[in-house]
Each structure stands twice: as C-alpha cells, then as structure tokens.
Image: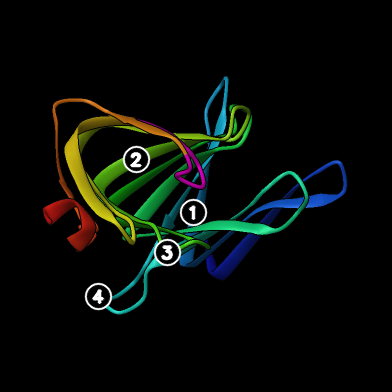
Amino acid sequence: MSWDAAFNMSEDGRPRAVLRARRMEQYQTDDSTYSVWRSMDDTTKVRVYLFDEEGDSSATVTADSLVFQDQKGVLDAYRNVVVTTEDNKRLESEHLTWHQADRTIRTRRFVRIRTPSEVVQGDGLVADEDLETYQLGRFSAEVDVDEDDDTDEQQ
C-alpha cells in the first residue's frame, strides 16, 4: 500500500497519463498485475491526467476509485466519474473504462455529456478520450439553437 501515490505513463518519451490518489494498493495474480487507486474522503478524488499524441493535456478524469490493469493498459473508473476536456466538455457517469492502446473511453452505464452548445445523455458510450467524437446508446439531447432575427425574410 502506498499513500499519496502517483504513477506516470509515457509513450515514445512523451507523457501519456498521470494517475494520482491518496491511497494505492497493488495486487498480483498468476497472469496479471493490477492496482486499486482510492480517495480517502468525500473531498479528495482520484485523478487521471490524459495527454494527446503530442504530449499536450487532453482530458482529466476524476472518480472515487480506479482499477488499473498495467499489462492490458486498461483503467476502470468507479463512482462519481467526471471527465473534463480542454475545450470545456464534461462527461458524467458512474463507471467508465479507458483503453490506452486505442485512446477510447467506454461505458455501458448512463452517461451525460455537456458541451458549450448541447447536453446529451444515454445508456452506453464509446468515445475518444478528448470527447471530440462519441457514440451514445439510447440517447436524448438538448441543443441550443441560435435563431437569427432575420427581418428581411419576414417582410
């Protein structure tokens, strides 16, 4: 068990992800190693900082706990999961899975995504990690429509 733990992942010498938590426990089975990352109170969340191919910040994930499978490059975030991106998108869910290899996040659970112009929600999600593209299952949406007050067409 480690306290105030951090784990840095890199790809080709560039940062890929940074995991931070108040407490981290590492476990080993016959065929895999995994770590459990936890917050210790309601105010401190586990954090994952994600970086794009150039090493620039692309998103931040916060959750109550994480399970990271190092050999598979798979991270599961649980309870009060929030993903925020550099361009003000926000995803909320109770569970999501991040796949390091293909840079995607997925869930089968309810998810809500807020952008500056819309709110979409549904059950199930496949998205790239910066939420530039996403697919929702059984979704609904609220979209802001900018109605032009075009008086020429009314005359």
Mark in front: 2 vs 3: 3
Q: Which residues are magenta?
A: 126-132
| In this rendering, position of residue 41 left or right of residue 11 | left
Badge 3 crowding class, 10 Å Cα cut-off, few under 14, some 14 to 19, many 20 or more, is: few
Q: Residue 61: x percent and y percent?
A: 44, 57
Note whether 31 is above or below 103 in the view shown.
above
Residue 40 location, x and y as percent? 34, 72
Dot placed on the residue nearer the N-terminal end, 1 or 3? 1
The residue tagged 1 is 25
Q: Residue at x 59, y 33 (%)?
A: 73
Q: Amino acid at mark 1?
A: Glu
Three-letter code, disc 4 = Asp
Q: Earlier in the sequence, mark 2 or mark 3?
A: 3
Q: Which mark is on residue 96?
A: 2
How much space separates mark 2 and mark 3, taking CA atoms?
A: 19 Å
Q: Secondary structure at mark 3?
A: loop
The answer to which of marks 1 and 2 sits earlier in the sequence is: 1
Q: Which residue is mark 3?
A: 88
Q: Which residue is mark 4?
A: 42
| Image: 121 above or below 72 | below
Q: Amino acid at mark 3?
A: Asn
Which label is found at residue 81?
none
Front position among marks 1 and 4 = 4
How many angstroms separate mark 1 from mark 3 (CA)?
Answer: 32 Å
**Tag 2 secondary structure:** strand
Q: Residue furthest top?
A: 31
